[in-house]
Amino acid sequence: MRGIEAAVQVYGEVSEGAFAAEALRKLYTDIAPPDRVLAATLIYCSLRRQGLWKHLLAKYCRRSTKDMTELTHNALIIGIAGIVELKYFALPVLINGLVQTIKLKGEDRDIALVNAVLHTVADEAKQYLVELKKGSALRDQALYWGIPGWAAAQWSKDMSIPEAKRLVRSSGMKTYLSLRLSKDVNREEWLEEYRTSGKIAWASPFLERSARTPSNPYPLEILGFGEGKITPQSESSIFVGETFSKRWKGGPVLDMCCGRGIKTGQLADLLPEAKIEAWDVSEGRIKSAEYEMIRMHVGDRVRFYCGDSRILEPEVEPKAILLDAPCTGSGTWGRHPESKWRITPEMVSDAAVLQKELLNRAVSIVAPGGIVAYSTCSMFREENEKVVAAVMAQHPELTEVPVERSHKLMSRGKPYGTLIWPGLPWIDGFYLALLAKRK
């Protein structure tokens, strides 16, 4: 399968609710090896600023999108994104690839439409985009960078207008892969071996156990992944795990919403003497987490339980709890761009309700003298500072523990916790608050 055809197919699956990374992974071996990067690039640039591409389609196409087949619509979105984003890809090759994809599906009647719209966009959209990018209005910036208008409006209420514009720009940024190196791996030696294989990576100046790549390589093809030596993980997420581990003073550890086990594996690696229990409501995620522990060679250090973290009982009273709470993920919209088109303002409020319940539960079961780390990958105050404030108001035995802000992208929350802004391709938006429970 050629890359353009694969991109159209995956985009269609994502439109039906699939996640881009999973859809690409399933199709990966079917895509011609030279075209795999092209397919992934087209998918992610199409999703990252999808709102803008749909706006341009409506602006330069005389036919209503309601009158198009799904395939034609998807091909046009892929084509418009490719025209704007792929600076060194020949326009005739892109259009021909999309036309051939449509022909394969037997929709020849739309070939003329696809040709006409894409050539019009190529000829006329450049100046319009320049003017849109220069626009001073927040709504123009949100449209240009591919951020839902309601989210930009909410950020303007949560922070200053300049801060909201900064967050809009950085949230539309292309992201690259950062890697967490396991405790027994020498970073310089791994980097040298990685470079010897013809790949590019360098040490992160932010974290001692992280490396940066200028791309998004397929995990199975990364040196040391299969052996558990390295793990794809954003630097913000790594920072949360490291900060929590440094505050551990001994005793049982609970990873309260472990997901697929990325931070669980990090904790098991950093705290080899800790007894770790991990919970998640999803049986599928628990199975993935168990596999992750096997890959990391720490399977004997963690016990997993599937169920609702609001009612599960720990085996032993934990002295430290990591609550990486389910959230709307707005801090990772650059990395998971399909998510932002599925989130609504109501979902932010619903997430905050659940987060308060989970944090209250964590505070109630952590041992006196213990610590709870509350984190999200959201940039909405309703999911961050307001959750922490509400729970602290109910629990006078809690005090906030300072977090060392060691990077220019880190700032104090208002008033609680620490924000990590998504300002570099390897750093996602995150929030972290450390709460100590007095004896």
Image (cartoon, rainbow, N blue to C red):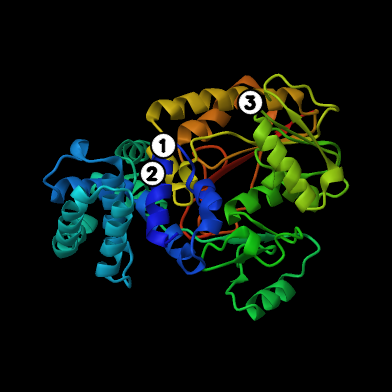
Between 100 and 382, the one lying in front of the other is 100
- Mark 2 = which residue? 12
Q: Residue at x 61, y 22 (%)?
A: 357
Number of numbered tags placed on the structure image: 3
Q: Position of residue 235 (x, y in %)?
A: 59, 56
Q: Look at label 1 and name its amino acid.
A: Glu
Where residue 188 appears, as percent x and y from the top left, is: 71, 75
The answer to whether residue 236 is left or right of residue 269 is left
Disc 1 vs disc 2: Cβ atoms closer than 8 Å? yes
Can you tell which quarter of the image residue 406 is in?
Answer: bottom right
Instruction: Report x, y in % for residue 312.
Output: 74, 22
Instruction: Describe residue 46's horizontal placement relative to residue 28 as left or right.
Output: left
The secondary structure type at the circle numbered 2 is helix
Identify the residue under disc 1. Answer: 16
Q: Tell me the kind of residue under disc 3.
A: Leu
The residue tagged 3 is 358
Q: Which percent across, then down, holds residue 199?
A: 59, 75
Circle 2 residues within 10 Å: few <14, some 14–19, many ≥20: some
Q: Secondary structure at mark 3?
A: helix
In this view, the mark in front (1 or 3)? 1
Label 1 to label 3: alpha-carbon separation: 30 Å
Q: CA distance from mark 1 to mark 2?
A: 6 Å
* Contact flag, marks 3 and 2 (Cβ < 8 Å): no
Quarter of image, res 252: top right
The residue at the point 43 percent across, 42 percent down is 13
In this rendered view, identify the residue nearer to me: 260 or 115.
115
Q: Find residue 192 and name its label.
A: none
Q: Is residue 94 visible?
A: yes
Q: In which quadrant will I find the N terminus?
A: bottom left
The reply, left or right, for residue 95 in relation to residue 309 is left
Kindly report the distance in space between the C-alpha atoms of the residues bearing marks 3 and 2. Answer: 35 Å
Question: What secondary structure is marked by label 1?
Answer: loop
